[in-house]
């Protein structure tokens, strides 16, 4: 009798363990979500086409540098009597890269200003423009432009006589098809007349 009771208890225990394991496995399968695959189904033949994964640009470190523009300005203009003049130099950098394979474009712009030191009929000013840009990975199919322009303004410091800007002049001073290597200081000297 003891053997029969022991056998019955053992059989019930084993059955309970198997039932619990089976239930746990079913729960585990139901709780595990399936990996989603993004794509589309062809309406004509029913074939599923998965979408290609977008690969991020290899460039994750910014390209840095500085453009140092030195302007030597010859002053030939005459100004209204009673005006006090200040010469302001400004410079802009513009970068754009067209990634031909995707038609994506990046655009960056920087600007900086500096007042000129005037001595007689000559003025000089230096404008430093540091930049730090995340650029697309280099490729033979990318089209890049890196341009610089400047503006010289003669500002009327006297508020009671004459217009606020007495003279304005500007031009491009830099046109490149690539951004200089990171860490580069690009020095440009320009002579101008106002």
Image (spheres, rainbow, N blue to C red):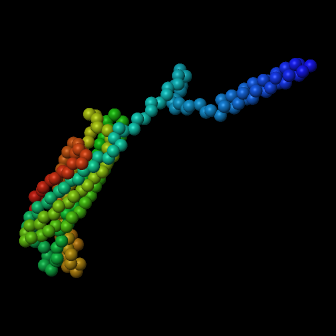
Which quadrant holds residue 83?
Answer: bottom left
* Residue 188 in the image, given as x and y percentages of width and height: 15, 53
Please identify the quadrant where the C terminus is shown.
bottom left
Query: Could you tell whether 8 is left or right of 98 in the image?
Result: right
67 up-or-down from 117: above or below: above
Q: Residue at x 53, y 30 (%)?
A: 37
Query: Visible in this render: residue 9?
Result: yes
Please identify the quadrant where the N terminus is shown.
top right
Which quadrant holds residue 111?
Answer: bottom left
Query: Could you tell whether 70 is left or right of 19 in the image?
Result: left
116 up-or-down from 64: above or below: below
* Residue 160 in the image, given as x and y percentages of width and height: 22, 80
Question: Which is more toward the observer, 192 or 165?
Answer: 192
78 up-or-down from 181: above or below: below
Q: How many marks?
A: 0
183 up-or-down from 84: above or below: above
Furthest toward the front, the residue is 2
Question: Which is more toward the observer, 75 or 21?
Answer: 21
Q: Residue at x 19, y 55 (%)?
A: 68
* Residue 150 in the image, given as x and y percentages of width and height: 19, 58
Q: Residue at x 20, y 45 (%)?
A: 176
């Amino acid at each position: 009798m003891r053997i029969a009771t022991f056998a019955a208890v053992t059989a019930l225990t084993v059955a309970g363990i198997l039932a619990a394991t089976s239930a746990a496995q079913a729960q585990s399968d139901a709780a595990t979500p399936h990996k989603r695959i993004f794509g589309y189904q062809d309406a004509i033949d029913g074939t599923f086409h998965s979408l290609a994964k977008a690969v991020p640009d290899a460039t994750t470190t910014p390209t840095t540098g500085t453009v140092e523009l030195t302007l030597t300005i010859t002053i030939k203009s005459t100004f209204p009597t009673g005006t006090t003049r200040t010469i302001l130099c400004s410079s802009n950098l513009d970068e754009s890269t067209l990634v031909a394979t995707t038609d994506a474009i990046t655009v960056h712009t920087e600007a900086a200003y500096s007042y000129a030191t005037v001595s007689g009929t000559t003025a000089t000013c230096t404008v430093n423009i540091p930049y730090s840009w995340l650029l697309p990975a280099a490729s033979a199919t990318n089209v890049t432009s890196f341009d610089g322009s400047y503006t010289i303004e003669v500002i009327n410091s006297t508020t009671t006589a004459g217009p606020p800007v007495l003279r304005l002049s500007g031009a491009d001073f830099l046109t490149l098809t690539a951004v200089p290597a990171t860490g580069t200081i690009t020095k440009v000297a320009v002579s101008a007349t106002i």
